[in-house]
Amino acid sequence: MLSLTKYIPYPSVTHAGGQYVLAHDRALEGFAAVENLAPDIPLNREALPLVADGPSASLLDGAHLDGLTLKLARLESVWAGSSIYWQVRRLFRSDRAPWAKLEAADAVELQWSEMIALAPAIKRRLPDTPLIGIAHDIITQRLDRQAQGQGSALRRALLRLAAARSRRREARSFSAVDLLIVFSEKDAVLASSLAPGVRVEVVHPGLGPTDPRPRAPHAEEPIVLFTGAMNRPENSTAVTWFIDEMWPRVLDAVPAARFVIAGAKPSAALAAKVSETPRAELTGFVESLEPWYAEASVFIAPLRSGAGVKFKTVDAMLREVPIVTTSVGAEGIDAPELLGALSDDAQEFAEAVIGLLQLPEAGGAIAAKARDWAEGVYGVAAFEKRIRGLYADVIDAQ
């Protein structure tokens, strides 16, 4: 199995997509020998030495990106419908792509919608090789949501243009694969509307604690927890909204509370904002989130943009932490009654957090039921069986 992935996974990877690829690779152990190939960008160069046991990983030769070149490539990527960088696309239009490896593979998978942009070129060259695309989210939906959000009229107009170009690109890309995997029924409907006739299957990612810890919430200084890669705009915007609109209300009611943002690569502006916020802290990169989940009294997901299943919310459910989230933060969860609260209104959101902090037993029973539900739907065993079955089916069909 040759996997063309946007990012190389490694054991301490902090972003949800990388954690999914780790679980995905583990699910294929014993079924297929996997090799990961990724763009030659700083994040992947840094990841290579961190790869432990598991699939081999290497960088795509002929498309080295860094500094200004990478910044320009990212801008062009948006213009090209949120495709992978043009240097990578150009590589796969030439004989310099790793065609020998691709031809030797029993199947080729493409992780992330951006990488699925390579599917038409691969299908033209290797029409008999099974192609499997894993759309971690539908980028068109993310851009549509951003275009409806805050900002200047010019920004919203540019986002609408980007969404239109993404819609056309994702339709072409998805149409070239033999199987498209998505993570929720909602995304399956969206993908099918973009590429009618393509086989679309829902796979619930296999999630769970990497280093299980018993629940030990702080009684004297209860923790409100948010986790995520803080260089992602949807995470940074969510934290900013919570600090501006909700955290003062929470502190007025529960002065001893602490707000912990556990995530790597915050911007300087966000770091400055958190430093000026009473009883709020940024952890930066941490080797494991498990201690923070164990000590948290409430997990929040005040997301208002983004697309796809919100792994952070499911992760909190699996660790039995009461959750307050928005409708966007609850996507992929078909049992909203198992959340501590769900609201897109800032005042209601804050009041729900306060209620769970003041009466922790109120969220305990719901959180226990939420854990049982999440283990049944997003458990590792069910995920591994599902992935192997789908891959075997596609390979046998060819």
Image (cartoon, rainbow, N blue to C red):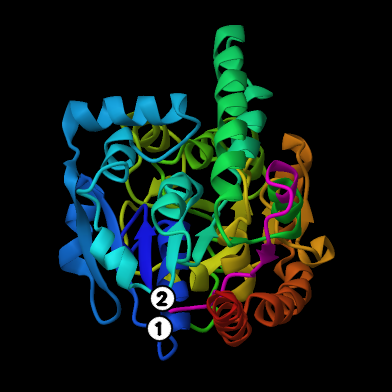
Would you say residue 287 is visible in this rendering? no
Quick check: is 358 in the magenta stretch?
no
Q: In the rendered structure, which amino acid carries the disc numbered 1?
A: Ala
Magenta residues span 192-212
Helix, strand or loop status at disc 1: loop
Helix, strand or loop status at disc 2: loop
Q: Are marks 1 and 2 in contact (CB under 8 Å)?
A: yes
* Residue in the picture at 78% in, 45% down: 343
Would you say residue 40 is visible in this rendering? yes
Can you tell which mark lies on residue 106? 2
**Which residue extends farthest right?**
337
Coordinates of residue 271 in the picture (x, y in percent): 35, 36
Identify whether 242 is placed above or below 391.
above
Tag in front: 1 or 2: 2
* Residue in the picture at 74% in, 68% down: 363
In this view, the residue in front, 124 or 114, is 124
In this view, the residue in front, 288 or 114, is 114
**Which residue extends farthest bottom?**
30
Q: In the rendered structure, which amino acid carries the disc numbered 2?
A: Asp
Can you tell which mark lies on residue 61? none
Q: Which residue is mark 1?
A: 32
Residue 26's image quarter? bottom left
* Residue in the picture at 58% in, 49% down: 174
